[in-house]
Image (cartoon, rainbow, N blue to C red):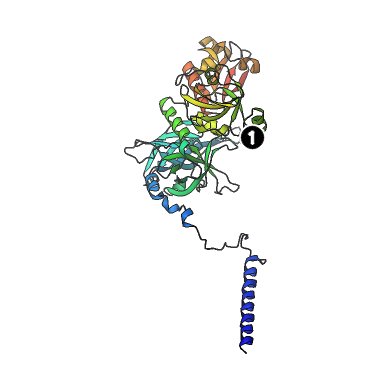
Amino acid sequence: MIHMKKISELILVSVIGGAITLASYLWFFSDGIATNQFSTDEKPRILQTNFNKNELYAAENTDFVKAAEESLNAVVHVKNISIQTVRDPLVEYFYGRSSERKFEQIGTGSGVIISSDGYIVTNNHVVQNATDIEITLNNKKKYKAKLIGADANNDIALVKIEGKELPYIPFGNSDNCRVGEWVLAVGNPYNLTSTVTAGIISAKGRDLDGNYNIDSFIQTDAAVNQGNSGGALVNTRGELIGINTAISSLNGGFVGYSFAIPSNIAKKIVEDLIEFGNVQRAYLGIYYEELSDTKAKALNYDSNEGVVITGIQERGAAKEAGLLENDIIIKINGNKITKFGDLNGQLKSKRPGESIKVTVYRKNGIKELNVTLKNQFGKVDIGKFDFTEYYIGDVKPINSLDLTKYKVKNGLKIQKLNNQYLSQRFGIKTGDIIIGIDDNAVKSEKELEYFLGKGQNKQYVIVQILTTNGQVEYIPIKIN
């Protein structure tokens, strides 16, 4: 009996064990109860997970509170008010009267106070074409703002409000931020007061398609949505390391990819706008391509990270410093260069006349060269530059006889043409008259110089030239 009793117990345990095994199988693997896939209307299960204490780096160890407290009051809401004009050509044609109607268009975004006296940095696309700019602080206090300057190429704008002892965020060094580092995105969308989200730096030196010429965005997974443009990306020390600018999304909402202009680029642009009124661009003076496996093998280099020089420009900084064709640029000032975005990011934070240390691979060895950067014209000068002389030539205001002869109200006659592109491509010659830049009439050399210089912040400017045969030509010129 005892033996039979033990057998019965064994059978019972086996049956229970089998039932548990079968239930476990159905739970984890049967159709309709998948553990690692679920449809849009299913909810993911919450499972406990054990961690090895010795390998755990807890988020709690990172102090977000201090950085958030120091940033919230320095991020503002930016309201852009512009007057748009629309016309109906059919109404004008059939009824012979003007159909012009004006309406107010409002755009919004965020901005970052960067000084106690009221300088605010934001994106150019937030304030572009604004007739009025209104700033609302986190405490709901409102100010009228003045546009100090903008750089459309890098999508940075600087505005100012009249204030004292305002909270602000100090600039940090974006070169020092690292992939995997915790960051906060602070914005003031929809005038809801400032909002903080947290994430990590996902990548550096990102190049985005579209109308972006930055090539060196900081990518983060901190949630950024519409209205956050121009807001702050800060590190856990509360330092500004980026200006939130764009998201990558199919539906317009945040899906895990947001991009910020590095603070070193933004800081340099802001300083240029305050000091010079335009952006001072530094050039290395090379032709280049990103390093490929094939090119690296041909140059006997055991990596495909870097930028290879394919040509040296005459009068450029590279030629003067001794850089050579087929040199592979691998570092700038000790910062690793893996692709052109890294190189471009370094150059955008520098001015003509500044020196940088360029590390290159050349013929089985590493060389370091000191390079003094120049501007696009092969000079180390910053600030004042004669755009009229370089892009046009010698000009002088037309006299009263020419005003009557050509039936114009203003203009500058070309005395000597320096820009061969104008003559070879468009047939412009000495004696032709410049009457405007974009939508601006030019009456003096000072005005012409101003509007050409302002064209640095655009893709190109349209120069209106009245030729001696009475034809008005509209010629695009890229000022870079």
Q: As drawn, which residue projects farthest toward the left?
A: 165
Residue drawn 58% across the image and 10% down it: 431
Would you say 435 lies left or right of 238 here? right
Residue drawn 63% across the image and 63% down it: 34
* Relative depth, front residue between 215 and 224: 215
Would you say 93 lies left or right of 256 here? right
Would you say 20 lies left or right of 394 here? right
Residue drawn 39% across the image and 50% down it: 65
Residue 352 lies, in percent from the top left, at: 48, 22
Would you say 2 lies left or right of 260 here? right
Seen in the picture, residue 320 relative to 148 is either above or below; the reply is above
Q: Quadrant of residue 209?
A: top right
Q: Which amino acid lies under the numbered mark 1 shown in the image of this protein?
A: Phe
Provide the secondary structure element on which disc 1 rests: helix
Seen in the picture, residue 366 relative to 60 is either above or below; the reply is above
Residue 372 lies, in percent from the top left, at: 48, 21
The residue carrying mark 1 is: 94
Quadrant for the C terminus, please. Answer: top right
